[in-house]
Image (spheres, grey):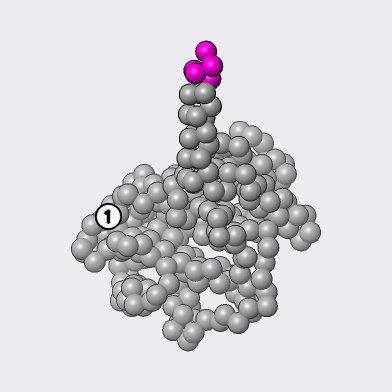
Amino acid sequence: MKKKLIILYFLLGITTIGFGQEFPEKNKKYDLQIFEFLVSSTEKDSTLLETFLMNIKPFSKWDMRPLKREKVWALDTIHLASEVPNFIWGAFSNKYKISQKESMNMPNQFLGKGVEKRSSLESYLNENLKKIDGLSKLILESKNDIFLSQNNLQRIDNVYKENNRYWKYSIPSDSPFPISNQIETNIKDSYSKKQIKLLELLKDLKIYSAIKTHKGIFYIIDGFTDNSYGYYFNQQGEMEKDNFLFQIMRSEKINKNYFYYVAN
């Protein structure tokens, strides 16, 4: 019996070490700190629902999905990265007095809108192909991967520009989340002329975000929690379907290098 207990404790110890190595954030409560930060931020600024929905779009300033790991330790267990924004939406939909039924229907309604808009958005891309080709060239040449242009908020990788002020999150080295409860405003970072031109092109083309991967570029026209729809660019004319940040529900080829996609 004693020998069996020793073996059991040994196995439990190995499991704990394994979780600690795979999920170093396990006991740090970064998820709770971020949630409390979002609660206090919305209360402090009396954030309207429309603004909140803008800020939690994929890759916007309150999107806390891990960008480099498909799984994360959050809410005392292991979750897929794509599940994290759904928890945030579930919690805040109640704050904004949206019924559970309505809040659960909104992602499906959003995806339905993405499917319905396919034809008009494909036509829009073909009409503006020269301009979007120029944008793709700029992004491929850039050392950056994340580009965002929303009203008064812009982002290039981890540097944000909001109301003409640059800032970034102070993120612990062992945190898998792209945001935190600490913001640095006294930074020397700024955007170059080429980066500004790129962001202006995004805005001009009515694309709020562009994400460069090792295979191509996702152009996000609109997003809700972890859902999005837009265009995908690939130099070989192949659709990327193995990116955990974009779980492709539907894709159709528009021309040689571009696809229309809907991701959930």
Q: Residue at the location (45% across, 50% down)? A: 69
Q: Residue at the location (36% across, 44% down)? A: 249
Query: Circle 1: is it few (<14), some (14-19), or many (20+) Cα within 10 Å?
Result: many
Q: What residue span does the magenta drawing correspond to?
A: 1-5
Q: Position of residue 188 (x, y in %)?
A: 60, 82
2 lies left or right of 118: right
Check the image and name the residue furthest to the bottom. Answer: 193
124 lies left or right of 55: left
Q: Which residue is mark 1?
A: 239
Q: Is residue 82 visible?
A: no
Q: Position of residue 159 (x, y in %)?
A: 56, 72
Whether residue 54 is situated above or below residue 96 in the rendered picture: below
Let me know if residue 127 is in the magenta part: no
Check the image and name the residue furthest to the front. Answer: 2
Amino acid under label 1?
A: Met
Could you say which is closer to the camera, residue 227 or residue 78?
78
Query: What is the number of callouts on the image?
Result: 1
Let me know if residue 4 is in the magenta part: yes
Q: Residue at the location (61% across, 39% down)? A: 75
Which secondary structure, mark 1?
A: loop
Q: Is residue 44 visible?
A: yes
- The C terminus lies in quadrant: top left
Q: Residue at the location (44% across, 55% down)? A: 68
- Quarter of the image where one finds residue 98: top right
Check the image and name the residue furthest to the top. Answer: 1
Q: Position of residue 61 (x, y in %)?
A: 59, 62
89 lies left or right of 216: right
Q: Position of residue 123 (x, y in %)?
A: 33, 63
Dominant SS of magenta comes to: helix
